[in-house]
Image (cartoon, rainbow, N blue to C red):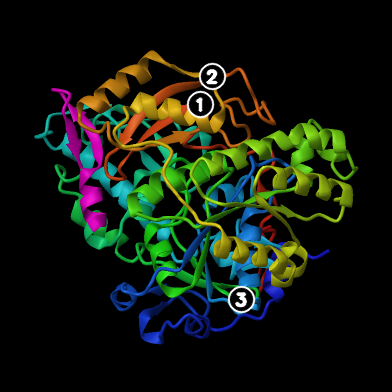
Amino acid sequence: MKTDIEIAQEAKLEHIRDVAATIGIEEDDLEFYGKYKAKLSDDLWEKIKDNEDGKLVLVTAINPTPAGEGKTTTTVGLGQAMAKLNKKALIALREPSLGPCFGIKGGAAGGGYAQVVPMEDLNLHFTGDFHAITSANNLLAAMLDNHIQQGNALGIDPRQVVWKRCLDMNDRVLRNVVVGLGNKMDGMVREDHFVITVASEIMAILCLADNLADLKERLGRIIVAYNFNGEPVTADDLKATGAMAALLKDAIKPNLIQTLEHTPALVHGGPFANIAHGCNSVRATKMAMKLSDITITEAGFGADLGAEKFFDIKCRMAGLKPDAVVLVATVRALKYNGGVAKSDLAEENLDALAKGIVNLEKHIENIQKYGVPVIVTLNSFVTDTEAENEYIRKFCEERGCEFELSEVWEKGGEGGIALAQKVLETLDNKESSFHPLYSDELSIREKIEKIAKEIYGADGVVYEPAAQRQIDRIESLGFANFPVCMAKNQYSLSDDAKKLGRPEGFDIHIREVYVSAGAGFVVALTGAVMTMPGLPKVPAANGIDVTEDGKITGLF
């Protein structure tokens, strides 16, 4: 069996200008990064902004398991299938982060015969967007510390610096560091912290900004610290905004690549907010909807994280109204949720399936709360049995949602035609009445509790004393109307990663709350989730190499 990278490297790619031409983009509107990657020009938006919006389909999944779900694979395969049905479809994806590529994931370009390419470029440096974000983030950090060193005219309290440095790599030893050691000229000694680049507020700002002017406004509002009077100090106060925007002027432009079957794909913006919970950029999604009849996009991790943020943050801010949701599961993952060990997942086990399917049930219920029609798809494995597939089909149909198998990993677009037809049927016959879960007017605590109880299924919320004080401060500063971005582990609906299926009788524990004033949301950290992850015992990096002729191996 060929690996993902072998399949990708054997593919014959088309020049990106020819891929762009299939959705009406002319060469003048492309900024080429080699032959197979391009950024879309700022001028293009002016040409397409009055086009009618196409339909918007979100692909999400159950809680991830070691058995694998295949969300990106399904997204790519569905786009390829739409093209086979002669539909003008465009895929809108997130860019992968280097940390997980070298850490636990090994890559994030889809899989099998449903991948976006060039796969190695995408999983490594791509077009440099993340480097630009890292540089802008650390420029602001450098200007902050320099301001304190050079007389501290703004009266910044070094004990109340909240801006963190970032790096696009999993590196646990950088979570808590001391900077400024040495002599007097080496800066003020203080405790500092790093986050992974995708957890940086700048990533969220890039993803949520409509244009360069909006980007600059958002950057200017970033709160970097508080002064000795407890008042916020911003990037504008430090006069850092212009320089940061200069570093990001190209990064804000969406990237165009192709699938193995030459379907166009916009890949732009990382999984913003807190590691991998978010979605691709507003700009890319809006452009995709103007350029196509159907935009297929995805959000990070399970529907309790990525889809919730897509609905409650991105759609709210950007005025987007999704028309349908494809919810990805696998028989194997559902059996894992039902208590079967990873080594035994190939065996038919209807009892375990019945126990584990409650996880899927909860995600169906959650999406229905937003008023959007749901299509459940099973990413097929050769070990799945007819009885297992039929059990899930019946289960879904009893709950008012559509169901279809997907075989895109093995067969590419051809294996997704049945799913694509089911999506088209849903778009034609079922009306979306999309609405966010909560209103802006609720307090921060009320928003947190609504998400915890309605989406996670918690009994209640327990706040650490520090979190209580932080919420009070955020509300006193006038940010109570912001949506809440919950940072939670991805493996469980609860904040305890070990509680699989559909946990009951638990509380959500909030240990820290901070405002991302530029992005426009409040972040609540739950349980043990980290914004700077570590590497596993055996990192994916161990198997990644490059041959003498420059061929990358080991990405998967």
Residue 173 lies within the magenta run: no
Which sits earlier in the primary sequence, circle 2 or circle 3? 3
Which sits earlier in the primary sequence, circle 1 or circle 3? 3
Of the residues shown, which amino acid type is indicated by label 2?
Answer: Asp
> Do the CB atoms of the residues marked 1 and 3 lie less than 8 Å apart?
no
Q: Quadrant of the C terminus?
A: bottom right
Q: Which residue is mark 3?
A: 83
Distance from the alpha carbon under mark 1 to that under mark 3: 40 Å
Determine the residue located farthest toward the top in the rendered image.
465
Distance from the alpha carbon under mark 2 to that under mark 3: 45 Å
User: What segment carries the magenta color?
Assistant: 214-234
Q: Which residue is mark 2?
A: 459
Q: Which residue is mark 1?
A: 453
Identify which residue, 163 or 81, lies in the foreground: 81
Residue 170 rendering spot, x and y as whole percentages: 53, 42
Query: Under tag 2, what secondary structure?
Result: loop
> Do the CB atoms of the residues marked 1 and 2 lie less than 8 Å apart?
yes
Determine the residue located farthest toward the left in the rendered image.
153
Determine the residue located farthest toward the right in the rendered image.
347
**Could you tell me if residue 341 is visible in this image?**
no
Residue 517 rendering spot, x and y as whole percentages: 27, 40
**Could you tell me if residue 216 is visible in this image?**
yes
